[in-house]
Image (cartoon, helix red, strand yellow):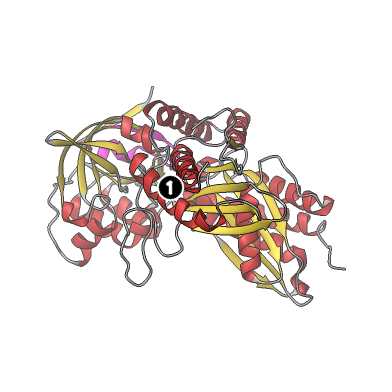
Amino acid sequence: MNKILKTPIQSEDVENLKIGDIVFLDGYLVTCRDMAHRRLIDMGMELPVELEGLAILHAGPIVAKDGDGWKIVSIGPTTSMRMEVHEKEFIRQTGVKLVVGKGGMGPETVAGCAAHKAVHAVFPGGCAVLAASRVEKIERVEWLDLGMPEALWVTKVKNFGPLIISIDTHGNNLFDRNKAIYNERKGPIVEKICEQVKFIK
Amino acid sequence: MQRDDMVTAMTDIMANFTNYLGKHLPDDIMAKLGQLRSAEEKPLAKVVYDSMFENLAQADALDRPCCQDTGVIQFFIKAGADFPLLSDVREILDEAVRRATRAAPLRHNAVEIFEEKNTGNNTGERIPWIDWEIVPNDSGIHLDVYMAGGGCSLPGQGKTLMPAAGYEGVVQFVFDVMTSYGVNACPPLLVGIGIGGSIEVAANLSKKALFRPIGSRHPDPRGAEMERLIEDGLNEIGIGPQGVSGTDSVMGVHIEKAARHPSTISVAVSVGCWAHRRGAIRINADMSYEILSHKGVTL
Ligand code: SF4
């Protein structure tokens, strides 16, 4: 059985998740990347979407006009690390419970997730058509003055995933842990290869 | 065929081919991803591979670019010295890119330096990028087309070492890049390594290494052996798809080389992400063409 998170997400829903778990999302997912973070945190502007208990996605979608409304053509996660400087404060101010993106995030986000009971998850990068197929509709768009990629697209999603938990509420970071393991394995492997490439005599 | 008709014909071919490339991975990449997927043992990594293949199937069915980042378009050309449209190639490729951008549609990924404005049509100063090699006594043209995404361009790095560092320094450099930047760039990656005497030579060759078909080996047995050693070593680290850790790490490792200065050894790394959107096409003087990367496809 797939584990489903439904918005509004409660602290209890995310508290028992651990890194490496896979979940799917039903409910509201709002795209939120560099500029939206900058406006809220650095410029102190009020976010036009109430994010308490919702999920955000680090992404700049391709969106097409569809009659009076909009339709998602493609929506893939972008590198989450770019939002690292702002994410802790962003989680504190908004009460967002699920942050979705690509690749890992750093210690600030880990601290924010632990303090305010939120998690970071990755959606497989480069799978933009799959992601688009899980978006039921775009409810509205805010801050469109930022341009299509940076605007806040408020979407209703069904079975959005797989989402791999990369930071849990207990201070664990999947990518940090993995990188430590890779670095540990690297030394002896490089040493072994170096023995065999002494072409400069 | 009149010259104008030839220009129109080649523009059509290249516009359609560029559009097609954003939606379909080449045969060798598809085969390699399939192989990695079936060899994968970790449950988390398997889920990621399943998503990738579902995504490719949907991109094909819905006729949409398989990744939203359709990159900066680059053409690496081997042009016959007798190819009749040599003077028109820049104009043809600019127009082909503009048309593919509208038709596909491709994301707008050309930002002018200093002005910091997105041109909105994927052309800009020196973009699409064209790299020329002239082939004597040939009347056709071979084009390797590549969509250089942001995520997979980010790990690109180079360094000029002193000979004392040796090929050991080259190996260390490649592993350092791969275990840091390589983890976030949508693995499993194809790794291109350029070795030469100065940095731009190494960088250029590292990119060209990405156009060699997967499974090919360097013609020099020492080069082939070094490719194998690095590939096996990286796989042993087990970065897995999307860096979530897994049975393997990479789609392949390719080395290209140029003779070096006695006092320097430059190394550069370029990577292609799992959605390695490259295509190879040969166009003849009569505008007949053959697609080498995606067998059986007509445009
Ligand atoms: S690294 Fe490649 S697959 Fe991943 S998002 Fe960028 S272009 Fe797409």
Residue B262 location (% of width, % of height): 79, 75
Nearest the camera: B28 or B295? B295
**Residue at 56% across, 36% down:** B26
Q: Quadrant of the C terminus of chain A?
A: bottom right
User: In this figure, which residue is indicated by the disc labeled 1?
Assistant: B96
Please name the amino acid that badge 1 sits on. Ala
Q: Which residues are magenta?
A: A9-25
Residue B34 location (% of width, % of height): 59, 30
User: Residue furthest toward the front?
Assistant: B2
**Residue at 14% across, 33% down:** A67
Q: How many marks?
A: 1
Whether residue B41 is visible to the viewer of this picture, yes or no, is no
Whether residue A49 is visible to the viewer of this picture, yes or no, is yes
In-image side of B19 versus A44 (left or right): right
Nearest the camera: A42 or B160? B160
**For mark 1, does the 10 Å Cα neighbourhood hold few (<14), some (14 to 19), or many (20 or more) residues?**
many
Q: Quadrant of residue B289?
A: top right
Q: Magenta stretch containing residue A18, yes or no?
A: yes
In-image side of A118 versus B20 (left or right): left
**Residue at 44% across, 59% down:** B127
In-image side of B11 versus B178 (left or right): left
**Residue at 30% across, 39% down:** A14
Q: Secondary structure at mark 1?
A: helix
